[in-house]
Image: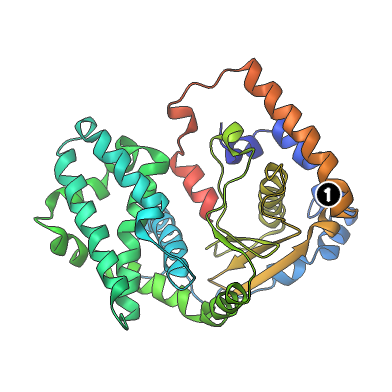
Amino acid sequence: MSLTRHLKNADSPVRNFIYASAPALAAAGIRGPIGTATAKKFGFDKLTSLVTQIPIPAEVKRAQRKSHAVVAGMALDYRLRMDLPGFDVGETTAWRGLERLQANSDAIHRGKHIAQLLQDALNFGYLTLKEKDPHPLSLARISIPLAWCEAIYRAGPVSALTNDLGRRIKRAEDAVGLMMSIDEELIFDVAQMHKPLVPLLQEWDEAEADGRVYTPNPTFLGSNAVGGADADLVIDDLLVEVKTREQITNPWIRDTLFQLLGYALLDIDDLHGIRRVAILLPRQPYIAIWDLDDLLGRDADDALPELREEFAALLMGMMSNQPREGGADDEFDDDELVAELD
């Protein structure tokens, strides 16, 4: 079961442990004076007062808004990483999604044709990245098939392609036709969200050049116990999640912080040295940063070893009592994909 599913399940021991590790945060934003005061203490009011400056384009029809949001969010993750050190198409979750499709191409109609077009599209992206000065819209465009392939990895070929996306790819004669069929509003949305984040990306790039460790798509020692959980990026001691949500509410902020706290606790061996967490909001645009000291209500260096040891014991007990069987339980459904990005 994924971390997202655990956190949505009020009966999950994983959720209960993570929430118990930060009792003050659990009260933030609930109804009543305590919830209001605690939310203010954690700075929720700053985020809820933000104005959405880059909304989903008006041209996107209501019925397509969810699918647009999922693809735009995944694509933006890739577009941001293109500006950071060491980006390699062949080392991405998207490439693993392509490989998953290639290994299961018989599961969907014209699966081999779809796999070939997506491989050509990713190869086209690789060549675009090698250009001396690629156009920003070209970079936004190549982020889209990367997002499609990541969806295949996370949801499985059948779920990801038995829909409008699968039909779109099947209709294309070649990769050029596929790339040119991408909706302009999707390309512009990714490009518009990326643009105001360029100074922050440059700052992170310089930090990595100065010796601070940058890790894209970090996984954690405890990830396998919760469906292979991975985050967006870690730079130095800061764990960052990119969320393309339009409406910011107290419950959403609280839930997202518990997602980040869950990742920090899954880093059982402290490989990434996480001591701060951040929510990056491209549509506002804004980045909010919290110290783990504040979220936990005590010194993180003292609290984390004990919490992680207890969490590891809980996860090991769950895995031994419920032997893992690979399959659909570890795949994301549409709502989980939205939750991961929104």
User: Quarter holding the C terminus?
Assistant: bottom right
- Furthest residue to the front? 211
Residue 33 visible in the shown view: yes
Q: Is residue 286 above or below residue 175?
A: below
Question: For residue 156, what is the image quadrant?
Answer: top left
Residue under numbered circle 1 = 27
Look at label 1 and name its amino acid. Answer: Ala
Quarter placement of the N terminus? top right
Question: What's the residue at 23%, 30% (across, down)?
Answer: 107
**Residue 43, image quadrant:** bottom right
Return the x and y of residue 301 as percentages of the image width and height: 85, 53
Give residue 16's quadrant in the image.
Answer: top right
> What residue is at 33 percent from the left and 72 percent from the top?
139
Across and down, in percent, residue 38 comes to 86, 58
Q: Nearer the viewer, residue 128 or 322?
A: 128
Q: Is residue 280 left or right of residue 122?
A: right
